[in-house]
Image (cartoon, rainbow, N blue to C red):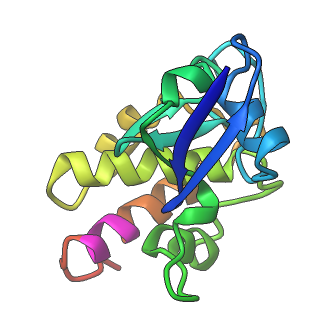
Amino acid sequence: MHVSVTVNGTRREADVEPRTLLVYFLRETLGLTGTNVGCDTSTCGACTVHVDGQSVKSCTMLAAQADGREVTTIEGMASDGELHPLQRAFHEHHGLQCGYCTPGMIMASDSLIREAGHPLAEEEVRIGLEGNLCRCTGYQNIVKAVVAASQEMHGAPASA
């Protein structure tokens, strides 16, 4: 089966088996290894990407379902050599430990922040990221990073 997908702003085409999951298409066919495979059951969220601007766990979507659509991976978050506010906040607030969950956390957080339309409170972040797991228990700093990024992305003054 032939698929044509715009990935991180670039049109990519390839022949794939009909059962190929989007996560494996991204990693193995396109070489975009920032999207991680954690569980293959949609439990952990390590494979979260954006499809047409919405968070999707790419281990639950076939590459064929992405045909003709726009996909953004963690590799597409930075712009003109500048880190995305979430990437910067994760670095500044130590929102990562081993880093395995980080790409999925950032992708899910970006959707959460954009959909909220306002700076997020800690509780909103905790509820909004329930489907993304961190096995290193780095949640406190992840939440701090997402709150800080949401303030920056919505132009609110940073809290102490």
Residue in the image at 76% along x and 48% along y: 30
Q: In the image, is residue 150 above or below residue 7?
A: below
Residue 133: where, in percent of width, then height?
64, 33
Q: Split into 4 quadrants, where in the image is the C terminus?
A: bottom left
Residue 82: where, in percent of width, then height?
53, 87
Residue 105: where, in percent of width, then height?
56, 47
Residue in the image at 22% along x and 46% along y: 115
Choose between 155 and 65: the one closer to the eye. Answer: 65
State yes or no: residue 44 in magenta. no
Residue 110: where, in percent of width, then height?
40, 54
Q: Split into 4 quadrants, where in the image is the N terminus?
A: top right
Choose between 53 and 147: the one closer to the eye. Answer: 53
State yes or no: residue 150 in magenta. yes
- Most prominent secondary structure in the magenta stretch? helix
Residue in the image at 50% along x and 30% along y: 66
In the image: residue 83, left or right of residue 15: left
Q: In the image, is residue 49 above or below residue 32?
A: above
Which of the 4 image quadrants contains residue 114? Answer: bottom left
Which of the 4 image quadrants contains residue 43? Answer: top right
In the image: residue 100, left or right of residue 119: right
Q: In the image, is residue 10 above or below residue 71?
A: below
Farthest residue in the left direction? Answer: 117
Choose between 122 and 68: the one closer to the eye. Answer: 68
Q: Which residues are magenta?
A: 149-153
